[in-house]
Amino acid sequence: MEVIDILREASSQIYKNVKDLAGTEEAAGDFGRGAGGDISRNIDITAEQTVLDYLKEINFECVVLGEECGRVELSNNPKGFVIMDAIDGSANAVRGVPFFCSSLAFATENKLSSITDGVITDLTNGDMYWASKNKGAFLNEKQIKVQQKEPIYKIVGINTSGGSNELMQRMYPIFQNHNHTRHFGANALEMALFARGLMDIFIDFRDKIRIQDIAAGCIIVKESGGLLLDANLNPLDADLSYETRVSFIAAANQKILDEIISQIN
């Protein structure tokens, strides 16, 4: 099996196992803080265990870097890293807000830039976004591209959740100049929507995002033709450490990137 097929199957199994769990009392529960620092909920644990069980079943030799479980070595001679946020948007999932996903990526080395495959599955409906390096990005079986033309409504995705006063002041002109700003509560799925052309730019400059949240989104954004940069407007890259936190901006083209960046204080 190709790596992308393994990630897609694991992602499908997550969907089967959690689609009826969201919004129920059973979804919650407090299992302490996971490796990523957030409280682990039952729906998170169920989703992660689904992936771990599947990877063990097929003897996929890798190191898993999970949001909850931490580093799990499934081989003494791993082919690479499976970077897993089995539930991105846990708060939405627990409350039953229909915007959360699973995010699985594969990297050959300890760098974001070495990611070769990624899968993001919308766990509210089973839609699967996926990409492999140099092979394009897809929604289910249809190839997707970032927004190619001037949109009727320009939509700016921006995550300021828990942002500092300084950050909010820097970003204020964006909110002032664009009525159509959006944040739905799951960065990975928002990156997928961006890759599909439903948003024109997506910004997270909080220096809070973990690698698990964006790993699959990175390859999907790039393979859909998007620009993916750090806060200094250099190509986004980072190591895969649990301590690593990043800021990023994904833009459909240079024109909208220049336009939005010119507004940031």
Image: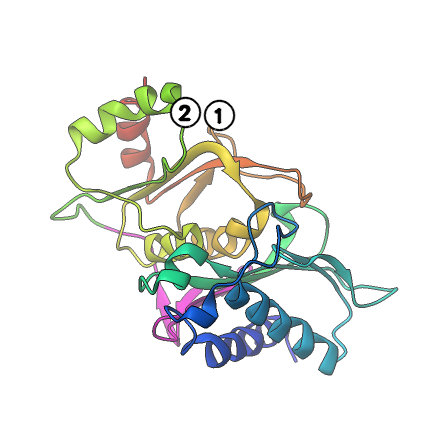
Q: Residue at x 16, y 28 (%)?
A: 177
Q: Are marks 1 and 2 in contact (CB under 8 Å)?
A: no
- Residue 14 is a magenta residue: no
**What amino acid type should be assigned to the residue bearing mark 1?**
Asn
The residue mark sitting in front, 1 or 2, is 2
Q: Residue at x 31, y 25 (%)?
A: 171
**What amino acid type should be assigned to the residue bearing mark 2?**
Ser
| Quarter where residue 48 is shown | bottom right
Q: Nearer the viewer, residue 94 or 11?
A: 94
Q: How many marks?
A: 2
Residue 47 seen anywhere in this rendered image of the structure: yes
How far apart are the alpha carbons under marks 1 and 2?
18 Å
Magenta stretch? 119-148
Check residue 232 in the rendering and tell me which mark sits there, or answer none. Answer: 1
Secondary structure under badge 2? loop
Secondary structure under badge 1? loop
Q: In the image, is 88 to the left or to the right of 114?
A: left
Instruction: Where is residue 261? Give x, y as percent.
Output: 33, 26
Q: Residues within 10 Å of mark 2 (few under 14, many from 20)?
A: few
Q: Residue at x 42, y 50 (%)?
A: 187
| Residue pointed to by mark 2 | 164
Instruction: Where is residue 207? Give x, y as percent.
Output: 51, 32
Q: In the image, is 4 to the left or to the right of 129?
A: right
- Residue 120 is a magenta residue: yes
What colouring method underlies this structural image?
Answer: rainbow
Instruction: Where is residue 145? Give x, y as percent.
Output: 34, 58
Q: In the image, is 261 to the left or to the right of 109?
A: left
Comes first in the chain, label 1 or label 2: 2
Residue 136 seen anywhere in this rendered image of the structure: no
Q: Residue furthest left?
A: 152
Q: Does residue 197 sit above or below 264 in this rendering?
A: below
Q: Nearer the viewer, residue 21 or 137?
A: 21
